[in-house]
Image (tube, rainbow, N blue to C red):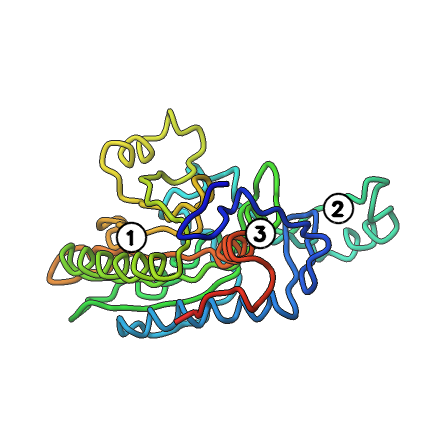
Amino acid sequence: MKTFLGKPMASERSIDWNLLPGYRWHENGQSTFSGAPLKLYQKLDRLFLQWAGERGAAEHRFPTFIPARELDRLDYFRSFPHLVTFPVTLDPSKDNLAAFVRGAPLDDAGHLQLAASAPIADVLTPAACYHFYIQFQDERLAQPRYVTTRATCFRREDHYAPLQRQWSFSMREIVCLGTADEVKAFLAGGRATVEGFFKKIGLPIEWQNATDPFFEPARSSKYLMQKLDPVKIEMVFNGDLAIGSVNFHRNYFGEAFRITRAGADAYSGCIAFGVERWIFAFLTHFGTDEAGWPVLT
């Protein structure tokens, strides 16, 4: 049997998620937590907050929606049309609402049959760090800025799997905005901290260069640029599941949102953690019994 530091590899441990106490999987790509799984969720996020605090990162909380006009600055809708999720409401005219009420709201498959919809001006958050660039737009940074947030993110996928691939999921990010050297130092320090943690607890993680999931990547100049000069490194569990990433954005967001540092467009970078995927890694590698979990400090 394959082992890692004396422990069974995750591929050797199978969990019936439908029978796990405190966890419920929803077929539309979402998870519900209580009991021990919720406790693990909270412990992991406290660990991420501890790492953020070690870097002086101020915590922020943001709303669920992002204005579409802000994401359009990033060419988001051409880059990721397959992932985006929109909040949709009905056109508020009385006749339109009456037509919806008189009709059959649901078809036999459980799909809503909408009347005319109102204009859509917002997007459900696709990545936690986007809020920061919108928040700090037009600022001149006198020093590097370190911030963190946890957001419920939404990415439409062609299939879902418990804790591994979800329509809505929790993302904790620690972000630095500054000069190129300041951001690179932040990312190097953050990666070293995470690497030390993985080594200490014996979680089988490899670091792999990656790209963002662009639509029609072969036709995407952004994808080709990331392939030629990798700026995204993923923490890959058991050879196939990215549970987090270290990302160097160059000055892309600084330029798009007119954020400057030292007289030039600010550079930025983030360390991102997918909370549900970390839970998957912990439970499949260390087991569902709390007594077998490593100390999270």
Answer few, some or many: residues within 10 Å of disc 1's Cα (few below 14, many 20 plus, some between 14 and 19). many
| Secondary structure category for the residue under label 1 | helix
Report the amino acid beneath label 1: Phe
Tell me the distance, in whole angstroms, between the alpha carbons under discs 1 and 2. 36 Å
| Nearer to me, 162 or 174 | 162
| Nearer to me, 167 or 40 | 40
* Residue that carries the numbered disc 3 in the rendered image: 163
* Residue that carries the numbered disc 2 in the rendered image: 114
Which quadrant of the rendered structure holds the C terminus?
bottom left
Report the amino acid beneath label 3: Leu
Tell me the distance, in whole angstroms, between the alpha carbons under discs 2 and 3. 31 Å
Tell me the distance, in whole angstroms, between the alpha carbons under discs 3 and 1. 30 Å
Left or right: 273 as drawn, with respect to 37 = left
Residue 232, located in which quarter of the rendered image?
top left
| Nearer to me, 295 or 121 | 295
Report the amino acid beneath label 2: Leu
Name the residue furthest top: 218
Mark 2 or mark 3, which has the lower sequence index? 2
| Secondary structure category for the residue under label 2 | loop
Query: Does residue 216 sit above or below 145 in this rendering?
Result: above
* Residue that carries the numbered disc 1 in the rendered image: 253
The residue under the point 42% across, 38% down is 79
The residue under the point 56% across, 46% down is 165
Left or right: 295 as drawn, with respect to 136 = right
x and y, in percent, of residue 143 in the image: 16, 70
Mark 3 or mark 1, which has the lower sequence index? 3
- Residue 148: in sight, yes or no? yes
x and y, in percent, of residue 206 in the image: 35, 45
Query: Does residue 234 sit above or below 184 in this rendering?
Result: above
The residue under the point 47% across, 52% down is 7
Left or right: 290 as drawn, with respect to 126 = right
